Amino acid sequence: MGHRKILFPATHLGLFFILYLLSSPCVSFSFPFVKPKNHKINGPIKTLVVLVMENRSFDHILGWLHKTRPDIDGLKGSEFNRVNASDPYSSKIFVSDDAVFVDSDPGHSIQAIREQIFGSNDSSANPAPMNGFVQQAVNMGVPGMEQTVMSGFKPELVPVYTDLAKEFGVFDRWFASVPASTQPNRFYVHSATSHGASSNVRKDLIHGFPQKTIFDSLDENGLSFGIYYQNMPATLFFKSLRKLKHIFKFHNYALTFKIHAKLGKLPNYVVIEQRYFDVKIDPANDDHPSHDVALGQKFVKEVYETLRASPQWKEMALLITYDEHGGFFDHVPTPVSGVPNPDGIIGPPPYYFRFDRLGVRVPTFLISPWIDKATVIHEPTGPTTFSQFEHSTIPATVKKLFNLKSSFLTKRDAWAGTFENYFCLRKTPRDDCPEKLAEVKTNLRPWGPREDAKLSEFQIELIQLASQLNGDHVLKNYADIGRKMNVREANQYVDDAVNRFLEAGRAALRAGANESAVVAMRPALTSRSSASDGGFNKYLEAY
Ligand SMILES: *[C@@H]1O[C@H](CO)[C@@H](O)[C@H](O)[C@H]1NC(C)=O
Ligand SMILES: *[C@@H]1O[C@H](CO)[C@@H](O)[C@H](O)[C@H]1NC(C)=O
Ligand SMILES: *[C@@H]1O[C@H](CO)[C@@H](O)[C@H](O)[C@H]1NC(C)=O
Ligand SMILES: *[C@@H]1O[C@H](CO)[C@@H](O)[C@H](O)[C@H]1NC(C)=O
């Protein structure tokens, strides 16, 4: 790899960190909010804001909207799954509209999803029968789970979404990119591949995932981007985003989002990351079970209203989607043919997943003054007859919307349907977009955050990411580091790690470090000992 390592003292922090240089070509350093110099954006949209919520299917969140909005492909009420998908005499469980609050987390590993979609381990059926959600839930052995996975929200319990669907656009054929968990799907949002990850692959986390991202493409074209994070920017899973030159692209949501929007200083591409840890002072708002969906609703409302009040509103679009279906039923068959593997990488054993079919349908909204009221977007018309809307649609659309000169990231975003044409259907932006959305009056969960709870798998991965940023990953107990924490401790740990990493990066830049370098911290636990201690040299060798 030929990484050059520089020992770098940041004296005011009382700790040391190391820089190692990445081999990628150095692009000129851009401060935040620098206007693109030579790049002209043709269409009306100069800023695209993306918000990815957690783990809910389309039918679970929006299915029951079909009653009053028959143009949306939702639930009729007659959909069911059998307790045993291969026994036509076993009992049926019908969809219901009584979702309120879901405590336990339905199955959404790659194996669980295969069973949900196909009703068995045989994934050859086309169309996919979508008949194994109940069976898979029964197999989990959690009482009541089979009813839970078939449940959906009444539209009045998700009033912000009901308003957004009435006022703007809904996609009713947008799928997760992979029939797998959170992390691979989030990778597709930003890079149109998961680089072979079909679950959560810890080994690759150490140096960050190496694939090119849409952020790199934007940067190559002189366009700006910003990540507004709450606990932990999960985008730091990507190696390229850890480079010093991107340090100023990370913004603390609470401190900066409203101000940047108000001053008209949001960059061309904005990613908002929600709060993944549920603590009393800042409850989680990512909609992941068992987090309160009412808080997710309040968060979406806040983001919308902030953007609506911005002087940039008329040149802006907001896309809200969900990373994956979270184990909840959806009746629309998951596309299983004509889906290209993005980069030739096959998933790890024992499944050797080929990345040639999509995940379950998820709710997705397109919000902009350039979108007519009550728009419903069904299937895309290209670029191929098999093309679908899925998370790679986001980088694919960014390329077309902002006419980037960079090539597509993978075969998948070259194939995905795009939505830039929906901004060209009107001559002028609407001036009747609501300034406020519906109030979210009731909490859907009868209790507050449980700070003593154990961490979910995804939260443990966030802890591991944090431990790479702060240097703790070199410690022997690194693999278990998240397993011993409760939510309160994890939240604190993550906040500290992100602050230390970003602060060290800023210090390195001030000291003139190469902007292609990445800061590597020493473990926090040994940072107070002297620079000449043996542990430090061991750490150098670890790279
Ligand atoms: C489901 O039904 C099939 C076909 O009748 C049967 O072979 C199988 O044993 C059943 N599975 C369970 C768990 O009952
Ligand atoms: C399906 O595959 C799982 C492993 O993923 C295995 O445990 C299970 O026995 C298989 N079921 C059938 C019916 O072959
Ligand atoms: C969403 O589902 C994945 C896959 O099972 C899980 O690992 C993750 O914990 C969930 N997301 C969050 C934020 O917990
Ligand atoms: C920074 O590092 C990169 C990669 O090693 C190198 O190509 C580039 O010339 C360096 N830039 C400066 C200003 O030293």
Image (cartoon, rainbow, N blue to C red):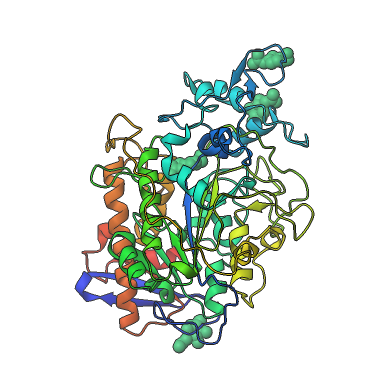
Which residue in the rendered view is the most extreme toward the front?
A: 432
Q: Quadrant of the N terminus?
A: bottom right
Ligand 2, image quadrant it occupies: top right
**Residue shown at 31%/82% (left/top)?**
510
* Up-down relation of residue 63 to residue 411 (above or below): above
**Residue shown at 34%/54% (left/top)?**
231
Count of numbered tags = 0
Determine whether, in the image, residue 382 is placed left or right of residue 225.
right
Res. 503 image quadrant: bottom left
* Up-down relation of residue 129 to residue 344 (above or below): above
Res. 261 image quadrant: bottom left
| Residue 179 visible | yes
Between 404 and 522, which is closer to the camera in this rendering? 404
Between 46 and 431, which is closer to the camera in this rendering? 431
Between 124 and 323, which is closer to the camera in this rendering? 323
* Up-down relation of residue 37 to residue 218 (above or below): below
**Residue shown at 28%/63% (left/top)?**
255
Residue 94, percent across and down?
59, 21
Residue 434, percent across and down?
42, 55
Residue 133, percent across and down?
60, 28
